[in-house]
Image (tube, grey):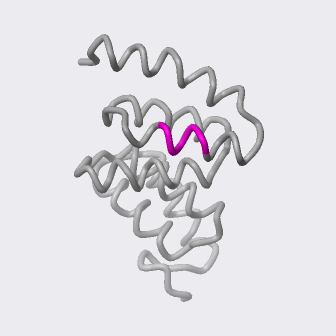
Amino acid sequence: RLSERDMEGIGFFYPCVIACGTARQQRRFTEMAEDLPAQVIYHLLRAFFQKEAWEPAAMLSASLEKRGLKDAGVFYMQGVALHYLRDEKKALVYLRRARDMGCKEAELDVYMRLAQGLDMDGKSV
């Protein structure tokens, strides 16, 4: 359950994330988010993911993982972001984690990667 402070954080940051267009603006909001509760960071991660801002999405999901959050949705978003940042081996690791936790979207992505000639560990087959 989100506290009043969390809701204020989401209320302020989420529209800003959606509106920010430059990499500098995205980096600024990502840095500001580091001090917020994990639930707020999760919502900001979703906003960056929807905006297809892969670098900030990867940074926020890594921040959540450092805080000990083990969530299939976070692992899925991390995997997709890393894929678009051209880090296929790490992307597959996170997609596999998400799939193993029951994330159906990740399961589909893993099979798409397999069809491209990579095994579950990111090695060429």
At a point 42% along the width and 79% down the height, the residue shown is: 121
Residue sitting nearer the eye, 28 or 123? 28
| Residue 71 x/y as whole percent | 30, 45
Whole-percent x, y for residue 59 in the image? 49, 54
Total tally of numbered discs in the picture: 0
Screen quadrant of the N terminus: top left
Inspect the magenta stretch and tell me whether residue 29 lies in it: yes
Name the residue furthest top.
4
Residue at image coords 47%, 71% = 90
Secondary structure mainly formed by the magenta segment: helix
Q: Between 26 and 97, which is closer to the camera in this rendering?
A: 26
Residue range in magenta is 28-32
Q: Residue 9 appears at what percent x and percent y?
A: 43, 21
Q: Is residue 55 above or below residue 16?
A: below
**Residue visible at 45% across and 30% down in the picture:** 43
Q: Is residue 7 above or below residue 59?
A: above
Q: Residue at x 55, y 55 (%)?
A: 80
Q: Position of residue 48 (x, y in %)?
A: 59, 39
Q: Using residue 31 as the reference point, say whether residue 28 is left or right of it.
A: right
Q: Horizontally, is 2 left or right of 13 in the view?
A: left
**Nearer to the camera, 106 or 58:** 58
Give the image quarter of residue 6.
top left
Where does the C terminus fall, quadrant-wise?
bottom right
Residue 74 colored in magenta in the image? no
